[in-house]
Amino acid sequence: MPNLVSVAGLLLTVHGARRLHTPAGIAEVAVGRLLDLVDGYLARALDQSSQFGAGLDAMFDKAGVTAVGMQLWRRCAPSRPALLAIAGQNAVNLVSTVITGVYDRGPGLLPAAEGKRAMAAQNAAMAAYAVSGLFAGSSRRTRHALLWVGHGATVIGVGYGLPASGQYIRRARHALSASLHR
């Protein structure tokens, strides 16, 4: 059941990202991202936690961020440096998670606490950027305020994301090293 929630969250996020220029698309992404938060709680509540589910959740999380980031890149030029920072961190974390998942079936797939905080701030940043696009033609002041909120959330997300990326990289390096010594 929790893995189905993960799949539904990713599908909603990807579908909504394609319509990110509309309130309905933004709402769809928001529900998809919320489902991504619910799947882990559901797995623990139903005692259905697994390494496969943790890995699936981690990969789907990064895929959802990527889908939203790509659409924002196309539409929101003022936030491109911020989106590049978010994408870079998520790419490093995704590759590290895949390496850890391939070479170590242990607890290395569980998200780092800093990673959860970074993801929350990065989701807030992308939400602010997406909503700012709705005000492109009507309210310049509101659009600029939302862009600044997005920039601030990006700084917070990158701040938490740097140590999280370090943890993901160390996990992957440890998994590779342990695999080579077997």
Image (tube, helix red, strand yellow):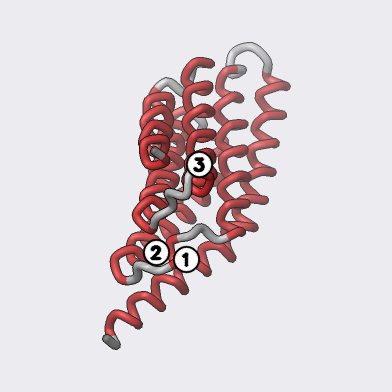
Q: Answer with mark 3 or mark 2, whichever residue precedes in sequence.
A: 3
Question: Few, some or many C-alpha atoms within 10 Å of disc 1 (few <14, some 14-19, many ≥20)?
Answer: many
Q: Which element is circle 2 on? A: helix
Q: Secondary structure at mark 3?
A: helix
Q: Give x and y (percent) for residue 49.
A: 44, 52
**Cα separation between marks 1 and 3:** 24 Å
> Quick check: can you spot residue 80?
no
Mark number, residue 168: 1
Label 2 sits on residue: 96
Residue type at tag 2:
Ser
Q: Quadrant of the N terminus?
A: top left
Marks 2 and 1: CB-CB under 8 Å? yes
What is the three-letter code of the residue carrying label 1?
Tyr
The picture places residue 150, in percent across and down from the top left corner, at 64, 37
Horizontal side, residue 126 vs residue 87: left or right: right
The percent coordinates of residue 127 (x first, y second) are 58, 32
Judging by the rendered image, the residue that carries numbered circle 3 is 42
The correct choice, above or below, for 104 with respect to 52 in the image is below
Q: Are marks 1 and 3 in contact (CB under 8 Å)?
A: no
Residue 172 appears in the rendering: yes
Question: Which quadrant would residue 63 be assigned to in this image?
Answer: top left
Mark toward the start of the polypeptide (2 vs 1): 2
Q: Taking 164 as reference, is 179 above or below it?
A: below
Q: Amino acid at mark 3?
A: Leu
Label 1, secondary structure: give it. helix
Closer to us: 4 or 174:
4
| Cα gap from disc 2 to disc 1, whole angstroms | 6 Å
| Residue positioned most to the top | 138
- Label 3 packing within 10 angstroms: few (<14), some (14-19), many (20+): some
Residue drawn at x 47%, y 49% as measured from the top left: 47
